[in-house]
Amino acid sequence: MISRRIFLKALVTAAVYYPFKGVCAYQIPDRKLNMYNIHTGERLSTVYSSSGVYDPHAIDQINYFLRCHYTDEVIPIDTRVIDLLCDVKDTFGGNKEITIISGYRSSIYNKLLRSLGRNVSKKSMHLMGCAIDFTIEGIDNRNLSRIAKSFKSGGVGRYPEFVHIDIGKIRYW
């Protein structure tokens, strides 16, 4: 049986702590992406992480959305590059739509792009689901690449049509 003294101490502690519980607890915001894929015409709006926990269903949706549009092959996209994309988007505030140019790229499609003279790497991070090419409505690519570089999370390339991010070695072009 609990003593009266212990009960009163617990009651006083709760009364003092309760008003400050929101201040003491670190709030992890939801991670949300609102995307449009230029190759498939698909849109996806999803909360993929809540209170720091990834939603497996939402991650599966993102993996499918970022599939190779040429072969329809789907692989797991590294959550670090998804988080980086979300971090870049969140820097600009709001729920701006992200236009996806490329997520996962199959080896077949990568070889095709190389044969067409596109300047794509034989060992592209896209082949491993570790890179995303994108733009964000209303934000120029110079600002997008500057913000992406500020996270120091991997490679950042600025092109006239899009910005490339990956989670490989830190490098810029």
Image: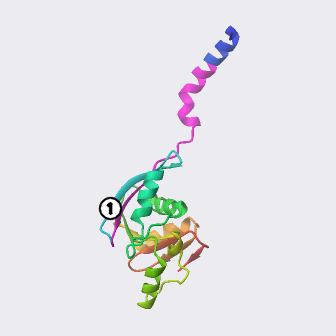
**Quadrant, the N terminus:** top right
In magenta, the rendered stretch is 12-39
Residue 153 sits in quarter: bottom right
Most foreground residue, 126 or 112: 112
Q: What kind of residue is marked 1?
A: Arg
Residue 59 falls inside the magenta stretch = no
Give coordinates of residue 119: x percent, y percent: 47, 87
The residue located at (38%, 78%) in the rendering is: 161
164 lies above or below 115: above
The image's colour scheme reads rainbow
17 lies above or below 41: above
The residue located at (46%, 85%) in the rendering is: 111
Q: Residues within 10 Å of mark 1 (few under 14, many from 20)?
A: some
Find numbered disc 1 in the image and state the secondary structure of the residue it sits on: strand
Q: Is residue 11 visible?
A: yes
Which residue is labeled 1 in the image?
Answer: 43
Q: Is residue 97 left or right of residue 152?
A: left
Most foreground residue, 59 or 25: 59
The residue located at (43%, 70%) in the rendering is: 73
Q: Is residue 95 visible?
A: no
Residue 24 falls inside the magenta stretch = yes
10 lies above or below 81: above
Count of picture labels: 1
Residue extending farthest to the left is 41
Give coordinates of residue 108: x percent, y percent: 45, 81
The residue located at (38%, 76%) in the rendering is: 70
Give coordinates of residue 143: x percent, y percent: 44, 70
Q: Is residue 168 left or right of residue 136?
A: right
Most foreground residue, 114 or 34: 114
Give coordinates of residue 48: x percent, y percent: 45, 52
